[in-house]
Amino acid sequence: MRNIVLFGPPGAGKGTQSVLLVDHFGFVHLSTGDIFRANIKGGTELGKLAKSFLDSGQLVPDDVTIQILEDTANGHPEAKGFIFDGFPRTKAQAEALDRFLESKGQSITAMLALEVEEEELRQRLSKRAETSGRVDDADPLVIQKRIDVYNAETAPVAEHYKGQNKYQGIAGMGTIEDIFGRLSSALEGGV
Ligand code: ADP
């Protein structure tokens, strides 16, 4: 069983690559962003709580996020391995994920970190706004807020995995196929 953290700033291509990785390697994809958006759409209590955070580019509080991640993972006892996309986004989430997996006799195999320049991220997110319908893609100020939150709170999560010798940087520029090729090589190379 391999459990992968797919890491990178907003717009790095985590969602796009996750779809390909699921198809090719049979992981279960767990995206906290997708979970929150589905709850907002469905009008659940969680959705009501999460909406203002998503719309303004802030993080949903750790306790709420960790609980929903664990509940969703527990709903997939058949999983041969998970891709965690958009989680962990804080050090507290990374520590909680370690404890959660450890309680099941498992662990994170690797963090694959998509590396993309900031200017490219801004362009990709504005472009995605034309089709995604996402409030947080449509406003340049919210995009900037997400990048700032990433740099302040999420980028340090890489240190957590570097300390465990699990960090692997992947060039996130180029075509979708190029990037998928790099991720696949990392996974086939024994990650
Ligand atoms: P992106 O990486 O493109 O910004 P995501 O779909 O991963 O988008 O996340 C969208 C939003 O959902 C975030 O800006 C944040 O408000 C919320 N969110 C997603 N994952 C987390 C998390 N692990 N912790 C806190 N908030 C989260």
Image (cartoon, grey):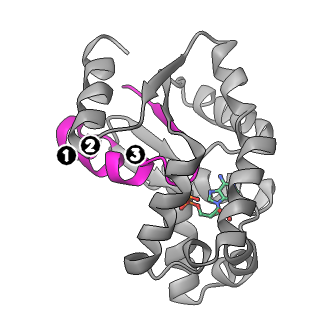
Q: Residue at x 40, y 53 (%)?
A: 15
Reading the chain from its start, which is encountered first: label 1 or label 2? 1
Displayed quadrant of residue 32: bottom right
Q: CA distance from mark 1 to mark 2?
A: 18 Å
Residue linked to disc 3: 77
58 or 171: nearer the eye?
171
Q: Residue at x 75, y 62 (%)?
A: 145
- State the image coordinates of residue 134 (x, y, percent, origin top left): 52, 78
> Mark 1 and 2 residues: CB-CB less than 8 Å, in contact?
no
- State the image coordinates of residue 14 (x, y, percent, origin top left): 43, 47
Compared across the picture, whether 77 is left or right of 21 comes to right
Residue linked to disc 1: 23
Disc 3 secondary structure class: loop
Give the class, few, some or many, for how many residues have Cα within 10 Å of label 3's Cα (few <14, many ≥20). Answer: few
Amino acid found under the numbered disc labelled 2: Thr
Whether residue 86 can be seen here: no
157 or 148: nearer the eye?
148
Q: Residue furthest front?
A: 119
Q: CA distance from mark 3 to mark 2?
A: 34 Å
- State the image coordinates of residue 186 (x, y, percent, origin top left): 33, 19
For the C terminus, give its image quadrant: top left
Amino acid found under the numbered disc labelled 1: Asp
Ligand 1 shows up in the quarter that is bottom right
- The magenta segment is 1-27
Whether the magenta-drawn stretch holds residue 69 is answered as: no
Q: CA distance from mark 1 to mark 3?
A: 19 Å
Amino acid found under the numbered disc labelled 3: Pro
Front position among marks 3 and 2:
2
Compared across the picture, whether 99 is left or right of 181 comes to right
Reading the chain from its start, which is encountered first: label 3 or label 2? 3
Reading the chain from its start, which is encountered first: label 1 or label 3? 1
Residue linked to disc 2: 175
